[in-house]
Image (cartoon, coloured by chain):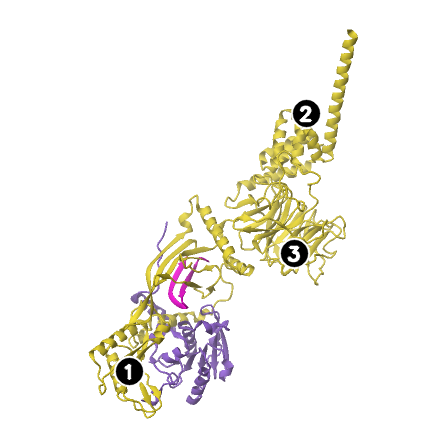
Chain colours: A yellow, B purple
Amino acid sequence: MNLKRLILLLLCYVCNFWSLQAQSLQQTEIQQLIDRQEYRQAYLKLSEEESKSIASPLRYYWTGVCFFHADAFRYKAQFYFDYCKPDAGQLPSLYYYYQARLSHLKEDFLKAINYYNEYLEASAGQGKIGFKEISRQIKMCEYGLKLTTKKTSSIQVSALPVPVNSSYDERHPVLYRSSQEVLYASARRKNQVEYILDESMPFWSDTQKSEGSNIYFTKRKDTQWGYPFLQKLMKDGEYSYPLYLSSDGKQMLLYVASNSQNKRGIYEVFNHKGKWGKPYRLPEVINSSYQEDMGACLALNGQVIYFASNRPGGYGGYDLYKAYRVGEREWSTPQNVGPQINGIADETYPFLVSDNKTMYFSSDREGSMGGRDIFVIEKEGASWGEEKNLGFPINSAGNDDQYTLIRGQKTALWASDRLRSGHIGGFDIYTSFTPSKRIKRAMVSGEILLKKYEKNVPVTLKVTDNLNQSYEHYIYNPDIVTGKFFMILMPKRNYTIQFFAEGKEIQTTKINLPEGLFHYELIQHFSIQPVDLLGMTVGAMVKQDSVSYQTLMLDDIQGKSIDDIRYDGLLQLMEEIVERVDKEGFMSLNQLDELVIKEEPEEEGPDSYYTPLIDVISQAFHEMAPDKLLTLHKLGGEKQEQLMVDHQLKRWKYDLLFEKGSTSLSDSQKEYLQQLAKFSKEHLLMLEFSWLKNSKRFDGDNRKRVANIEAYLSSLDLPDYQYRAAPVMVEGPVEDQATVTVKLIQIATN
Amino acid sequence: MIAQQHISNSFSNLRTYLLGCCLLLPLVGQAQYTEYERKAGMIYTFGRLVTWPEHAWKEADHLVLGILGDDPFGQVIDDVLKNRPIKGKTWEIRRGRAVEEVRGAHIIFVSNAYSKQEVKEILRQIYSRRNAMVLTIGDQIDRFCEIGGVINLTENLYTLNVMAANRAQLTINVNLLRLASDIIPYDPDDSYENGY
């Protein structure tokens, strides 16, 4: 019995021993995996049943560490760290560091500062992370507190959606042709359809994990981003990412990652007729034996390169350098851009805007809220001014890299590994939408309908401003069915809109778009009505049936919660229409950009000395000079309607028949002439009276008849230049046909 | 709030008259503009008040002014027209002594250095081509409009031949008619000149 008990006890002991031994082995194995930074293996081990025997605080801590280093779902580490918080004293001091980093990344800066301090206390200054680094992180948190309180609420930031972003790293965006088209690098595997990790497994498997990044192209259509397509720039097995793309989309800098020092570095590649050529490596003055993998850009039509390098001789870490092109593929010796930009921290990802004076770069320098933040610096004369952190919400406590934009447009792109809500995994591409209220554009829309015999007639619009500049882009003619038209113009100007139909100008309208205009609505309905004269159609008259105008100022809607949404919606609409309708591509977009960003026309104005003279003459013509006022003929009223001259007018003729031997005008002829005189006055026409005449100047009595007609018209106050005699010369004898033919000639327009 | 916006196509007579008088005051008071500065200003205004048919711009990026004969303007005309585009077209000035040298011009200014016969020949050469959509302006040339020119600058103001304008396919703004000191309603092809 005793023996049996003894054996049983021994078995229990052995089992327990083996169990403890196994637990210890498991624990050691996981510890080693974590030390070797093999977090996926560690996570898998921790998920095994045997690991459940490991004391829960440590197991939860390790699980938290694995999530912290996971390919996705990094934020889930918080749950595990918080779970083992009561037993934190039993955990390594790094626990506090992880808590601090996670809080920092989640932009809970106060909590992060506390944890950083707890880490320093727990490690007694002897921890893996040194005092200097922790102090630096605390300082970043302090900047973070300042920057987040000064946030610019109107800037909207969002990650591009899946499948543009994925659980893999998406980085290095460059804008292609416009802010609608993007080249970027994704670390996803080629031909792999799975981009998103499942929550149950935050790591990619060995067959899924990234091998390197490749360049992809995506395009925004309306509000949707399209499927990204791989750009075959490199051979299989070679990995690269874009650094810079020229504004015409024809010249790109990219970085080729390779273990071979002779192969890796910045490359330049050109696009010819839509196809990328063979990239060539920039010479060794640019690609040194150190690292140039953190950004580059070209300026001044590709004649200057700015790039980041950690070569010796700088101010510390990566610095920005500048070199000039001295041959097709040759570059001058790079020069450090100097201490105004470079410092002991890393300065990376330079991006010089096309104005050649505004530079964006990423740096983890003092003033960053965590990781690398994006800074902007402007040239002041020959030197650089003071850099400015782009602040919240563009920057984050993570790394914010390769900021890129097109001058004058409101969309910017960059890559960030932030932990803010909306992130997808690792580095993602983010986009910002800058405050639209600052963009000086106004929409003019409404309805222009022209009806002829109850059928709609197409109307085209011609727009000129008060500087006589014509506008062709973003002027969309009225739809023939609905009459809806649309145009995008710059406020703070007066415009003349001319309406054309059937090749003739039918109406001119002047509109004033004051500063801060939100929307101008113009509704005009016209109809073309035939005009008859003495029983025959002479032409057509355009009559304005109705007109109404409404303006909506930005101030009218400011202060209401919907203002940004409505105005942003308007701009979005403008963009979509511009994209959909404009077939002229990139150049026309550039023209719009220029118009948008130009405060005032930069070109030299007219000689102001002559302006009063021109004004006086214009005014004299507009309302006649006073000394000439009384001597001039007056033609009708101010608001004469314009007759649309067409073939009918040219074909119109009327025969005045006389009795043979009679030259006097009958009452009915006088009545006709009254009608003709009235019509000619109204429509600025000339009455031409013709009759046949031969070389012997015999024309019967017709000349006398026309003289009587002229005398009668004169008595009707028809100006003498609005009627004329025009005998038609013929060969041979002419009989007295007793007929005078009247024709109409248009001599002027209102 | 939706505000009503007014579109004004014309001033009221009184307001415009007063404005016109006010604008004239500096000119009268200072009288600093010379004869050819005023004439340059008139040419610019004629350009504004005349409409060329669309096909007149087919091969033209600029509104071309040709000055035939001795140039009485000098630099003045360049200064007046510089950076004062009309309907989006900037001015180009060509100078010459023969019609061929100013071929392609939309406006031809004929200086008063020619004899009546020479002016006749110049006008014949200008308008002998089909589709010669040219506004001819004579510089105080005797009977310029009567022999087929469109506008003749005179001591008072100018004479206008509406038929010559019509033949050249030019659309004349009514204001140009209103201010003309004389309007000629025939062209030289008519037998009017010879009497009938």
Marking on residue A393: none
On the image, the x and y values in percent for residue A308 come to 68, 51
On the image, the x and y values in percent for residue A48 come to 69, 28
Q: Pick out the residue farthest to the left.
A: A667
- Which residue occupies the foreground of this view, A170 or A593? A170
On the image, the x and y values in percent for residue A293 come to 69, 49
| Residue holding disc 1 | A740
Mark 3 closeness class: few <14, some 14–19, many ≥20 residues within 10 Å: many
Q: Which residues are magenta?
A: A487-513
Q: Is residue A43 above or below residue A478?
A: above
Q: Pick out the residue farthest to the top.
A: A1
Q: Please tell me which of labels 3 and 1 falls first in the chain.
A: 3
| Residue holding disc 2 | A52
Q: Are marks 1 and 2 in contact (CB under 8 Å)?
A: no
Q: Chain of mark 1?
A: A
> Between marks 3 and 2, how big is the CA–CA gap?
53 Å
- Which residue occupies the foreground of this view, B188 or A89? B188
- Which residue occupies the foreground of this view, B40 or A654? A654
Q: Where, quadrant-wise, is the C terminus of chain B in this rendering? A: bottom left
> Between marks 3 and 1, how big is the CA–CA gap?
78 Å
| Residue holding disc 3 | A252
Q: Main secondary structure of the magenta part?
A: strand
Q: Residue at x 72, y 52 (%)?
A: A235
Callouts 3 and 2 in the same chain = yes
